[in-house]
Image (spheres, rainbow, N blue to C red):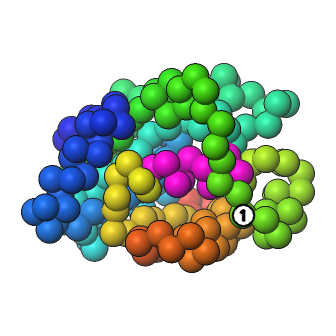
Amino acid sequence: MEVIETIARMLARQAEWRKSGREVGLVMTMGYLHEGHLGLVERARAENELVVTSIFVNPLQFGPKEDFGRYPRKPEQDLAMLEKAGVTTVYFPSVEEMYPTGFQTSVEVSEITEVLEGAIRPGHFRGVTTVVTKLLHAIGPQRTYFGQKDAQQVAVIQRMVRDLNFPVQVVVVPTRREPDG
Ligand code: PAF
């Protein structure tokens, strides 16, 4: 399993994959992985020759009163889990790599981000769609996998992918529950 930390290397790898015609499935995460993430990886493995998982705790999707700094992080454990799960490549950029000084562009879906979770977390979905755009551009997957449990997030990403004609299929994977529900 390869770990890539820079956008330049990720884009170079994407170009090689395209040239060789190999299909890529992407599972985006903020790390601190659990069975639900592994379910997405399993589905991606079944449908693609190569599987990329991104690990990036995205500061843009945290509000000023939500603690980005205290979001749980266990990178070593995550990498061991992903290696065991058969992931080809982990994309693991730093905040500086994703948002260098001077960064000032965002991607925003309107109406459907103004209700439900969007109504109580202003700016949250703008942060999500901005990072998802950057990850899709850097990795260039044919398919990307999201858990059905984050229903509004899925609807927002599907809307963005349709509206902006991203050449990627969004695959929604049913929620995997613990035995106690
Ligand atoms: O669902 C998540 O873990 C995040 O919102 C995502 C899609 C990885 C973007 O940071």
Please tell me how many numbered marks the rendered image carries: 1
State left or right for residue 18 relative to residue 55: left
Residue 49 percent across, percent down from the top left: 19, 65
Residue at horizontal 47 percent and vertical 69 percent from the top: 166
Dominant secondary structure of the residues highlighted in magenta in the image: helix
Q: Is residue 121 left or right of residue 142?
A: right
Q: Secondary structure at mark 1?
A: loop
- 42 shown above or below 67: below
Task: From the image, tell me which residue sits under label 1.
Answer: 109
Q: Magenta segment, which residues?
A: 126-135
The residue that appears at 42% across and 53% down in the rendered structure is: 137
In the image, taking residue 164 as reference, residue 42 lies left or right, namely left
The residue at the point 41 percent across, 72 percent down is 167
User: Is there any visible trace of residue 77 in the rendered image?
Assistant: no
Picture coordinates of residue 143 (x, y %)?
37, 69
> Is residue 17 shown in magenta?
no
Q: Residue furthest left?
A: 20
Residue 123 in the image, given as x and y percentages of width and height: 79, 47
Q: What amino acid does circle 1 point to?
A: Val
Residue 146, compared with residue 29, is above or below; it is: below
Residue at position x 58%, y 22% in the image: 101
Camera-side residue of 174 and 14: 14
Q: Quadrant of the C terminus?
A: bottom right
